[in-house]
């Protein structure tokens, strides 16, 4: 068990959040109520409100689409990709609850990050541009098309075309080579650290998007790629052939045999979801569909065995060790809940296995949201049953808040429409050529100008001054 951080931290947080706290009724000391549909909706609304307090992208002078960051520039806890993940979470929130409050802010955020070639490779973030990072934004665009999130104005990039663009850049020959018999590398620019690593999540997202584009468009090219991509992940032993554990990746220097056996929940869950899309797409071809069914079953069994002991989400690679979870890792539980909920719609045979687990997990998630000045801030340690301040993992709490919103709102999955396709109500305009003429992000990030440096220095000075002020305040406060 972790201990909570010093309660003194609450003194100045109280001042900051007191005003916001007055706007909405506080949850009771037992955490959020999720016993009825109405309570789930009301709880989700407050959770969404609190989550969006972390998002400043629609304020003057801020960058739309991203959470405060990236850490490498000292601007906050969050890498570029997590903004895309936030946008996806909020698209699901709207889809599940019908609350349109944040739709315009979300649309603005996504469209701001599409980059010059409308393929989610904005130059600003080249230094942390992995196939998985780009892929997270691509999956958010795909979700917008599948959920029928309101289409952008006609002169703006469209959801389906954006997803196709990301997929096409990742299917292009310059992303593929013969090392390890195939597979995508983690990073896109060869100069980035991690270009020599071929990891599961990057390949699993490319697989997932291929499966979804196949189902949406019924263009078999996507399905062929998805099938090949899954097979590669399996053949290179990133999926254990006995236990169906899903490992992290390996290096090209070692032909990907130096497998890093760290297991992350989202890698397993994204594979289950992609397999479910393939299962749904291959209806009518019994043998192929059966193969995907087995993969769904084995991977789900492994996911629940390793990441849901006691039926409650647990981030195996880091959760048992104090401070071992990074801001990235603390956001994975939410994706797992959202993706597995969607699996029950497109592969309904999984419903009775999956929904009870998501429910016990969501109950534990909601119960521990009793922290902070509002009395409803959420932590990451759901199994413990008590709030643990996100400060123990050195985060400000956006991932933790996203996780609980996802877990709670996904309880409404049975009342939500399943993901549409081109022939079942989808209206997003596609473009099979999107992304094919893209400049690939292989150039180094734009050079840092003197003005940038001066700005950064000023920020550093302000941050240090602010830090000292808070330190003095906190120490005098007692
Ligand atoms: C930003 O979005 C929030 C909703 O999250 C809204 O309340 C606020 O008015 C918006 N601010 C601006 C400057 O548009
Ligand atoms: C890139 O950075 C500039 C300067 O901070 C900012 O104005 C712009 O919005 C950023 N673009 C993206 C896509 O984030
Ligand atoms: C690399 O591993 C693959 C299996 O993933 C194998 O087929 C191939 O022969 C290996 N190549 C070398 C050079 O060892
Ligand atoms: C495919 O998905 C739809 C929901 O869009 C669902 O109704 C149908 O049962 C699924 N097909 C199979 C074979 O499970
Ligand atoms: C469905 O896809 C076809 C072929 O790409 C396209 O012509 C048609 O406009 C699409 N339908 C909708 C509703 O977008
Ligand atoms: C199917 O998708 C592939 C890959 O994007 C594309 O090259 C091809 O033109 C598409 N076919 C049709 C009929 O749209």
Image (tube, grey):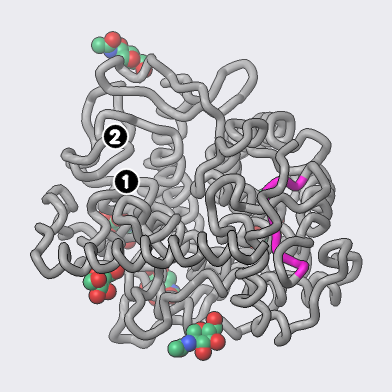
State which quadrant residue 18 falls in.
Answer: bottom right
Query: On the image, numbered disc 1 is attached to which residue?
Result: 130
Crowd class of label 2 (few under 14; some 14 to 19; many from 20; radius 10 Å): some
Q: Main secondary structure of the magenta part?
A: loop
On-image quarter of the N terminus: top right
- Distance of label 1 from label 2 (alpha carbons): 9 Å
Q: Secondary structure at mark 2?
A: loop
Total marks shown come to 2
Asked if the residue at label 2 sits under 8 Å from ligand 3, the reply is no
Q: Secondary structure at mark 1?
A: loop
Residue 432 vs residue 238, the one in the foreground: 238
Crowd class of label 1 (few under 14; some 14 to 19; many from 20; radius 10 Å): many
Q: Residue at x 71, y 70 (%)?
A: 373
Whether residues under marks 1 and 2 lie with C-beta atoms below 8 angstroms apart, the answer is yes
Is 431 situated left or right of 426 in this image?
Answer: left
Expressed as whole percent of the image width and height from the top left, the position of residue 19 reads: 65, 84
Q: Which residues are magenta?
A: 375-382
> Where 300 sits versus 84, above or below?
above
Query: On the image, numbered disc 2 is attached to which residue?
Result: 194
149 drawn magenta: no
Q: Residue at x 77, y 72 (%)?
A: 43
First reached walking from the N terminus: tag 1 or tag 2: 1
Q: Residue at x 54, y 45 (%)?
A: 274
State which quadrant residue 225 falls in.
Answer: top left
Residue 42 visible here:
yes
On-image quarter of the C terminus: bottom right
Expressed as whole percent of the image width and height from the top left, the position of residue 460 reads: 30, 61
Is 163 situated left or right of 470 in this image?
Answer: left
Q: Residue at x 54, y 44 (%)?
A: 329
Is 474 situated left or right of 105 in this image?
Answer: right
Is 247 situated left or right of 351 in this image?
Answer: left
């Amino acid at each position: 068990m972790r201990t909570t951080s010093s309660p003194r931290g609450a003194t100045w947080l109280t001042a900051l959040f007191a005003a916001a706290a007055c706007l909405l009724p506080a949850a009771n000391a037992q955490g959020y109520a999720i016993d009825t549909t109405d309570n789930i909706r009301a709880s989700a609304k407050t959770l969404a409100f609190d989550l969006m307090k972390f998002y400043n992208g629609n304020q003057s002078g801020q960058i739309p689409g991203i959470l405060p960051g990236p850490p490498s520039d000292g601007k906050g806890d969050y890498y570029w990709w997590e903004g895309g993940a936030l946008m996806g979470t909020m698209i699901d929130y709207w889809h599940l609850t019908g609350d349109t409050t944040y739709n315009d802010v979300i649309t603005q955020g996504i469209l701001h990050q599409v980059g010059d070639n409308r393929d989610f490779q904005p130059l600003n973030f080249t230094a942390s541009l992995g196939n998985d990072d780009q892929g997270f934004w691509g999956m958010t665009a795909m979700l917008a098309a599948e959920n029928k999130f309101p289409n952008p104005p006609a002169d703006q990039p469209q959801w389906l075309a954006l997803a196709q663009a990301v997929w096409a850049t990742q299917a292009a020959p310059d992303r593929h080579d013969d090392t390890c018999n195939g597979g995508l590398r983690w990073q896109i620019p060869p100069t980035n650290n991690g270009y020599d690593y071929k990891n599961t999540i990057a390949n699993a997202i490319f697989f997932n998007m291929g499966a979804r584009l196949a189902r949406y468009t019924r263009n078999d090219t996507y399905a062929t790629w998805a099938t090949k991509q899954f097979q590669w992940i399996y053949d290179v032993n990133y999926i254990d052939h006995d236990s169906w554990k899903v490992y992290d990746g390996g290096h090209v220097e070692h032909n990907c045999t130096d497998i890093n056996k760290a297991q992350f929940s989202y890698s397993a869950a994204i594979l289950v979801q992609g397999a479910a899309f393939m299962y749904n797409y291959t209806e009518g071809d019994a043998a192929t569909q059966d193969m995907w069914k087995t993969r769904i079953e084995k991977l789900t069994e492994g996911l629940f065995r390793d990441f849901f002991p006691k039926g409650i989400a647990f981030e195996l690679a880091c959760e048992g060790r104090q401070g071992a979870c990074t801001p990235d890792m603390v956001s994975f539980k939410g994706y797992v809940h959202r993706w597995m909920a969607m699996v029950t719609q497109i592969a309904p045979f999984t419903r009775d296995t999956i929904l009870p687990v998501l429910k016990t997990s969501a109950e534990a998630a909601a119960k521990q949201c009793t922290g902070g000045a509002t009395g409803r801030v959420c932590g990451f340690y759901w199994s413990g049953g008590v709030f643990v301040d996100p400060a123990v993992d050195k985060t400000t709490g956006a991932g933790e808040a996203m996780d609980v919103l996802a877990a709670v709102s996904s309880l409404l999955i049975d009342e939500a429409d399943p993901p549409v396709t081109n022939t079942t109500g989808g209206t997003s305009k596609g473009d099979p050529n999107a992304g094919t003429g893209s400049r690939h992000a292989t150039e180094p990030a734009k050079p840092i100008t003197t003005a940038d440096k001066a700005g950064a220095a000023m920020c550093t000075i302000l941050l240090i001054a602010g830090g000292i002020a808070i330190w003095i305040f906190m120490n005098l406060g007692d």
